[in-house]
Image (spheres, rainbow, N blue to C red):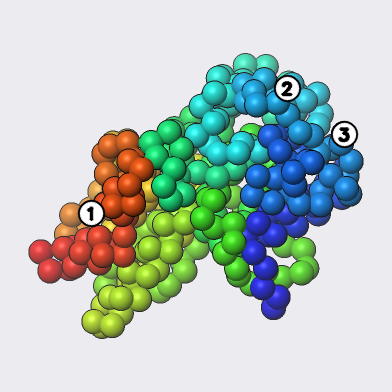
């Protein structure tokens, strides 16, 4: 199977869907003439023209609102935020318009649109450009929230998101656009709301999503050197969450560690912990452990970045804590 970059997988998904349906268009800052801030939309302006690949002003609230109106009138916008840190400027349109319009209109208006772009930290970008808002958007009824971890999942999930008749938040990472992985040339889609067991195991379940899956898988490899068997689950979507897959895994391993790039309060890991204690409490041989970011804005210095983020070492320690407590 061919190997392509994460950014190429996203581009293929958009290209294929835009060729299939003329109602789909892309808009955002620098997506057209500059080929995208991260070159995800490279070549799309030449193929589809300026009416379907649209450069916007630096005005997230404005172009998010235009996209919601377009979706209400039968089009299927894909809105790129240069970073989801900037989506806070547009959050009124995302939360109060896109997510609620179907209910408020009594089912008269579907909102078939995707908001996509990078989330979380990307090195030394400091406090205002290093935030992960997956749990914020997952808290809102009416939205679906997708966070792929590899090129194969990214392409299949983005195609599904574009075809969905509800608004989808599609969150990537600047540090993943150059990642390479196997992606088939033939057509495929991946359903939203279905987790993937990336590695089977028997001693402990590790759950993560997005770029932090790299940390989870690296920790599992380190632990395997000590004959510790980790089952690693990639959520892929955080609204809806595939609780059933996690519960069945915990019933087998009897231990759970959840790893995510988010502040600890009201995080996805908090929600998973609650659901496991509600549905699999009698199977747990140790309390659920979480590995999150530090509960502070991220500083600029590389030493701060290292201490702030989940790491392989932190996950290994958490797994050993639940195994040997």
The numbered mark, 2 or 3, whose residue comes first in the sequence reads: 3
Q: Is residue 96 above or below residue 166?
A: above
Task: Please state if 39 lies on the left or on the right of 24 as rendered.
Answer: left
Residue 165: x and y, percent? 70, 37
Mark with earlier residue (3, 1): 3
Tell me if residue 219 comes above or below residue 267 in the rendering: below
Q: Residue at x 38, y 48 (%)?
A: 261
Circles 3, 1 touching at the beta carbon (< 8 Å): no
Residue 110 visible in rendering: no
Q: Position of residue 138 (x, y in %)?
A: 47, 37
- Would you call the spot at circle 3 few (<14 residues within 10 Å), some (14-19), or many (20 or more)? few
Of the 4 image quadrants, the one containing the N terminus is bottom right
192 or 2: nearer the viewer: 2
Can residue 209 be seen in the rendering of this structure? yes
What's the residue at 44%, 43% (across, down)? Answer: 125
Q: Is residue 92 left or right of residue 79?
A: left
Q: Could you give the CA–CA distance between mark 3 and mark 1, rounded to whole angstroms?
A: 50 Å
Within-10-Å neighbours for mark 1: few <14, some 14–19, many 20+: many
In three-dimensional space, the C-alpha distance between marks 2 and 3, rounded to whole angstroms, equals 14 Å
Q: Could you say which disc has been placed on residue 51 in the image? A: 3
Q: Secondary structure at mark 3?
A: loop
Residue identifier under label 2: 66
Q: CA distance from mark 2 to mark 1?
A: 44 Å
> Looking at the image, which is closer to me, 181 or 230?
181
Q: Secondary structure at mark 2?
A: helix
**Category of crowding for the residue at label 2, using alpha-carbon neighbours closer than 10 angstroms: few (below 14), some (14–19), many (at least 20):** some
Direction from residue 39 to residue 230 in the image, left or right: left
Residue 222 image-quadrant placement: bottom left
Disc number placed over residue 288 in the picture, else none? 1
- Nearer to us of marks 2 and 3 is 3
Quadrant hosting residue 168: top right
Above-or-below relation of 17 to 68: below
């Amino acid at each position: 199977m061919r190997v392509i970059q994460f950014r190429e997988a996203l581009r293929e998904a958009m290209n294929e869907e835009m060729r299939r349906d003329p109602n789909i268009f892309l808009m955002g800052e620098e997506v057209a003439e500059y080929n995208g801030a991260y070159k995800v939309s490279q070549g799309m302006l030449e193929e589809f023209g300026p009416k379907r690949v649209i450069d916007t002003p630096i005005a997230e609230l404005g172009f998010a609102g235009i996209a919601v109106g377009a979706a209400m009138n039968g089009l299927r916008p894909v809105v790129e935020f240069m970073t989801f840190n900037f989506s806070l400027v547009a959050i009124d349109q995302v939360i109060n318009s896109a997510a609620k319009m179907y209910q408020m209109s009594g089912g008269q208006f579907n909102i078939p649109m995707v908001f996509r772009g990078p989330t979380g930290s990307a090195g030394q970008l400091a406090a205002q450009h290093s935030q992960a808002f997956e749990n914020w958007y997952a808290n809102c009824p009416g939205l679906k929230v997708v966070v792929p971890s590899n090129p194969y999942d990214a392409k299949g999930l983005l195609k599904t998101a574009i075809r969905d008749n509800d608004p989808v938040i599609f969150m990537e990472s600047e540090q993943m656009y150059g990642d390479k992985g196997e992606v088939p040339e033939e057509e495929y889609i991946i359903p939203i709301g279905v987790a993937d067991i990336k590695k089977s195991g028997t001693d402990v379940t590790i759950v993560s999503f997005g770029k932090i899956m790299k940390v989870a898988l690296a920790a599992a490899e380190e632990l395997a050197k000590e004959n510790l068997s980790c089952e690693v689950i990639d959520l892929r979507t955080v609204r809806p969450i595939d609780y059933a897959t996690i519960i069945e895994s915990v019933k087998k391993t009897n231990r759970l560690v959840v790893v995510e790039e988010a502040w600890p309060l009201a995080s996805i890991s908090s929600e998973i912990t609650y659901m496991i204690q509600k549905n699999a409490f009698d199977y747990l041989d140790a309390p659920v452990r979480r590995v999150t970011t530090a509960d502070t804005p991220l500083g600029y210095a590389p030493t701060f970045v290292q201490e702030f983020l989940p790491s392989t070492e932190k996950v290994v320690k958490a797994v050993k804590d639940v195994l040997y407590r």
